[in-house]
Image (cartoon, rainbow, N blue to C red):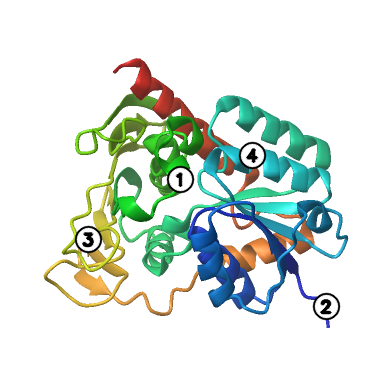
Amino acid sequence: MSTPLKIAALGLEHRHIFGMAQNMIDVGAEFVGWWNDRDPALRASFEKRFPDVPEFTDKTDILNNPDIDLILVAAKSSDRAQLAIEAMEAGKDVMADKPGCTTLEQLQSLQDCVARTGKIWTVDFSERFEVASVTKAAELVAEGAIGRVIQTIGMGPHRLNKDTRPEWFFDRESYGGILTDIASHQIDQFLFFTGSTDAEITMANVANYANPSSPGLQDYGELALKSDNGHGYIRVDWYTPDALPTWGDGRLTILGTEGYIELRKYVDVAGSDGIDHLFLVNGDRCEKIDCSDAGLPYFQRLANDLRDRTETAATQAHTFKTMELSIKAQMLAEQSK
């Protein structure tokens, strides 16, 4: 029997750490420790969720442990790149929460580190990797169910939960801006579904319309992009109303030359209960498709990649390009304000 993959966490600044850790545990990884230097509220939730995982008071004890294979990084957004670099320099592969970095300088440092160390730096774009309906949509697209994909429309509304957010969440330099942060999910999906390796940002805007008391927060963002393979439009915001029974009505429409797919990932307002609602319309089908057996293959593929030194979960080039375009969209939006 092969030795189980051992994982540890550096930074517990975003609740995405729960999904990152649990999904790796679900594919056989052993969670052996964590380190955190902020956010006691999230620390308590983490200890409740993973009561048997020990805390390390010194992160170097994790970095210097030769048995640890993969480091999960969910620290403050602007700190993630440096922690990832420290981990890779210590011989570990890294899965970062999105955004994996917040500046082009950080991205270049990460690229240099990957080239120098040969380690894997991946970003858990959870709105694709942790959503079964996206898995099913990818299968349908690969089967040719809607022909050639020529456009994606991604909507990423979120609930602000202002009273429970840490101070850094409202500081532009700390979280990186709304397009760098949230829209990296939708850019990832655009590149993936159109099969694009590069793209041009043709329009980008950010604003703060509803939170004047938090001037560092951007609560609205949009962008358009195009590649040789297709077009995309993205809107993200922090306006989810209180009556919605989940944090956001995230949607993705995938337009092909022979049909389209719509995903209502987390809720079907005034429709069916549950999550992962997928609708397919093409020349002979107009139906809702069950996604319950689709699974979340990213995590097993990543585990295989760590062992085999392959790129089946997400190519390194794709991850770098997603963050590059997210940051460039943010820069364009702020230049045009």
Q: How many marks?
A: 4
Which residue sits at x=37%, y=55%?
164
The residues bearing labels 1 and 4 have C-alpha atoms spaced at a distance of: 18 Å
Query: Which dot marks residue 81?
Result: 4
Q: Which structural element holds mark 3? A: strand
Type of residue at label 3?
Answer: Asn
Residue position marked by numbered label 3 in the rendering: 282
Which residue sits at x=28%, y=39%?
219
The residues bearing labels 3 and 4 have C-alpha atoms spaced at a distance of: 43 Å
Tell me where residue 237 appears, x and y as whole percent. 27, 44
Q: Residues within 10 Å of mark 3 (few under 14, many from 20)?
A: some
The residues bearing labels 1 and 3 have C-alpha atoms spaced at a distance of: 25 Å
Query: Which dot marks residue 188?
Result: 1
The residues bearing labels 4 and 2 have C-alpha atoms spaced at a distance of: 31 Å
**Residue farthest along the bottom direction in this orientation:** 1
Residue position marked by numbered label 2 in the rendering: 2
For marks 3 and 2, give the one nearer the viewer.
2
Marks 3 and 4 close (CB-CB < 8 Å): no
Marks 1 and 3 close (CB-CB < 8 Å): no
Res. 177 image quadrant:
top left
